[in-house]
Image (cartoon, grey):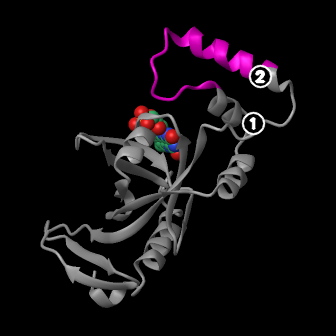
Amino acid sequence: MDEHDLDDDPIAQLQAWLEEARDSVPQPDAMTLATADEEGRPSARVVLLRGIDERGLAFFTNLTSRKAHALRQNPRAAVVLHWWELGRQVRVEGAIVEVSDEDSNAYWKRRPRASQIAGWASPQSQSLADRSDLDARVAEVEERFDGGEVLLPPFWGGYRLVPDSIEFWTHQDSRLHDRIRFIRSGAVWSQERLAP
Ligand SMILES: Cc1cc2nc3c(=O)[nH]c(=O)nc-3n(C[C@H](O)[C@H](O)[C@H](O)COP(=O)(O)O)c2cc1C
């Protein structure tokens, strides 16, 4: 990978790599999201990238989950996308902002009904007595909505990672992999090559 192979705009470059990944990677939108709580204790989990534009990378979740608690205490995050089939990795770091209610609602409406029911029924990251506890919650939510529209829960929504660092990595058999990192200062991105 040469510096000149990459778009000057790293968001456009990430969009291009994502599109290329769709041809060979089963779930190219899966990304590992790392957060840290107020004590600096890290945690990581996979979420789906559900929107990328000049504003940043959006994902959706339960706003009472462990990740949501951490993001309220410490609104910064890092994500990693890895596409084994392409020998590519992208690392993104930045500040976290909440997605507007309008955008959360628009995404919610596109989700399958079963996912909407699950969103209501699951107290994400909290302890359950057993599996039947969850099944009972699902049955209760299904009865409540009774075949009607399943509205956006007040405890569900999106976050946007506003990048200030984006690194593109490509595999080399020599193990001398290529790494090019973009750093944002205000509205201007600059790039540097990092040692593998
Ligand atoms: C492929 C994959 C995609 C996932 N997508 C999401 C997602 O978009 N949003 C979400 O809240 N959890 C998603 N999860 C579940 C999370 O990994 C995690 O179990 C859950 O969000 C609770 O995390 P927390 O306790 O750290 O908040 C996904 C898991 C996998 C394996």
State which quadrant residue 73 falls in: top left
Which of discs 2 and 1 lies nearer the camera? The answer is: 2
- How would you classify the magenta stretch by its main secondary structure? helix
Magenta residue span: 121-143
Q: Amino acid at mark 1?
A: Arg
**Mark linked to residue 113:** 1
User: Looking at the rendering, in which quadrant would you find the C terminus?
Assistant: bottom left
Q: Position of residue 129 (x, y in %)?
A: 49, 8
Vertical position of residue 120 compared to residue 111: above or below: above
Residue 93 in the image: state x and y as whole percent.
33, 62
Write down the residue under mark 2.
142
Identify the residue at horizontal 68%, vertical 20% (top origin): 138
Could you tell me residue 130's position as x and y percent? Answer: 50, 9
Within 10 Å of disc 2 (Cα), the crowding (few <14, some 14-19, many 20+) is: some
Residue type beneath disc 2: Glu
112 with respect to 49 (left or right): right
